[in-house]
Image: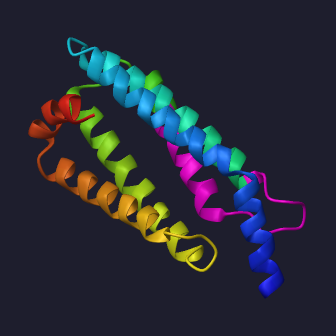
Amino acid sequence: MNEAKTQNSNTLAHNWWMLALRGLVAIIFGVLAFVLPGMTLLTLLFLFGAYAIVNGVLALVHAFSAPKGYPRFGALMVTGIISIAAGVLAFIWPGITALSLVLLIAAWAIVNGVFEIATAIRLRRVIAHEWLLALAGVLSVLLGIVMLLQPGVGALALVWWI
């Protein structure tokens, strides 16, 4: 059991850059949304689509980078697949309405948040400060729920909040 924890810790430590890269992509997405205040929801849709696809690919790379014979991180794989699907849908339906965009992002935020919480729980004895990952998951779920309850306000707030 102790050897598995050490191997898991080593895997996470070796692949720290993938998590950092996902964070960097999120920051770039946020900065682009902020410096382009006149952007339309269609542009936001494409930015979200690109972010979700890159986030999903990086999550899958992270999940599949575990050494041979070592269990994969199922929550990361599901998060990666959901993120890629959300991004692809954003590009396939470019004429999506503001309401649909809000609902798509709300659903994505809830699912992503649930799996972030699950990952934090699973790795609570392996990584330090796992509560931060769980907190990010809780905030993501709460954001998704608020957006589902107030989609009209969510569309406008989304542009400025990002």
Residue 98 is situated, as x and y percent measured from the top left of the image, at 21, 28
- The outermost residue toward the right is 68
- The main secondary structure of the magenta stretch is helix
Q: In the image, is 88 to the left or to the right of 61?
A: left
The count of marks equals: 0
Residue 42 rendering spot, x and y as whole percentages: 31, 17
Whether residue 20 is visible here, answered yes or no, is: yes
79 part of magenta stretch: yes
> Which of the colour schemes (rainbow, by chain, secondary structure, one colour) is used?
rainbow
Residue at image location 20% in from the left, 47% down from the top:
147
Residue at the image position 17 percent from the left and 53 percent from the top: 146
Relative height, residue 53 to residue 79 (above, below): above
Looking at the image, which is closer to me, 130 or 116? 130
On screen, 61 above or below 66?
A: above
* The quarter of the displayed image where residue 124 is located: bottom right
Res. 95 visible in picture: no
Give the left or right position of residue 39, taking residue 128 as reference.
left
Give the magenta range: 64-87
Q: Position of residue 110 (x, y in %)?
A: 35, 56
- Is 94 displayed left or right of 126 in the figure? left
Residue 84: % across, % down: 55, 38
In the displayed structure, 85 sits above or below 110; it is above
- The residue located at (27%, 42%) in the rendering is 103
Q: Give the quadrant of the N terminus.
A: bottom right
Left or right: where 53 falls relative to 18: left
The residue most toward the top is 38
Residue 82 colored in magenta in the image: yes
Query: In percent of the image, x 49 and y 26: which residue is there?
Result: 50
